[in-house]
Amino acid sequence: MSACIVISKSQLVGLALDAERGLLYYTDLIAGIVAEVTTNGSNRREIFSDRSKYPRAIVVDSKNR
């Protein structure tokens, strides 16, 4: 299984995998977003955006979903 995330002018700095749900979460420092994508690379969804901040890290809390 491989996935490819292509976003122009991006800097992905935080990654977290929710293997149980098949989702990869990531932060984009330049775009100021947190997003998710399925592990097969489809269905990218922006879940948080604060263009004035620089998100650097993300964690999946599988116990308290």
Image (cartoon, helix red, strand yellow):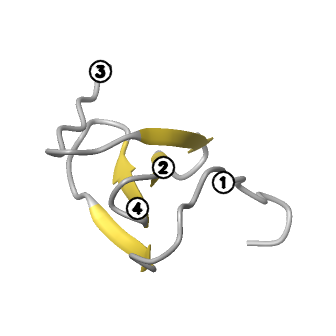
Pointer 4 or 2: first along the chain: 2
Give the answer, above or below, for where 62 lies relative to 24.
below
| Image x and y of residue 61, in percent | 78, 60
Q: Are marks 3 and 1 in contact (CB under 8 Å)?
A: no
Dots 4 and 2: beta carbons under 8 Å?
yes
When the figure is inspected, residue 32 is found, relative to residue 49, above or below; the finding is above
* C-alpha separation, residue under disc 4 versus residue under disc 3: 18 Å
Q: According to the image, label 4 marks what residue?
A: 35
Q: Is residue 25 left or right of residue 43?
A: right
Q: Is residue 13 above or below residue 58?
A: above
**Quadrant including the N terminus:** top left
Tell me which residue sits at (66%, 50%) in the image: 57
**Circle on res. 58:** 1
Q: Earlier in the sequence, mark 4 or mark 1?
A: 4
Q: CA distance from mark 2 to mark 3?
A: 16 Å
Question: Can residue 18 be seen at all in this image of the molecule?
Answer: no
Identify the disc placed on residue 2. 3
The three-letter amino acid code for the residue at tag 2 is Tyr
Left or right of residue 45: residue 60: right
* Distance of label 3 from label 1 (alpha carbons): 21 Å
- Residue at image x 25%, y 58%? 44
Is residue 10 among what the camera can see? yes
Q: Position of residue 15 (x, y in %)?
A: 56, 40
Q: Which residue in the rendered view is the most extreme toward the right?
A: 63
Name the residue that disc number 2 marks. Answer: 26
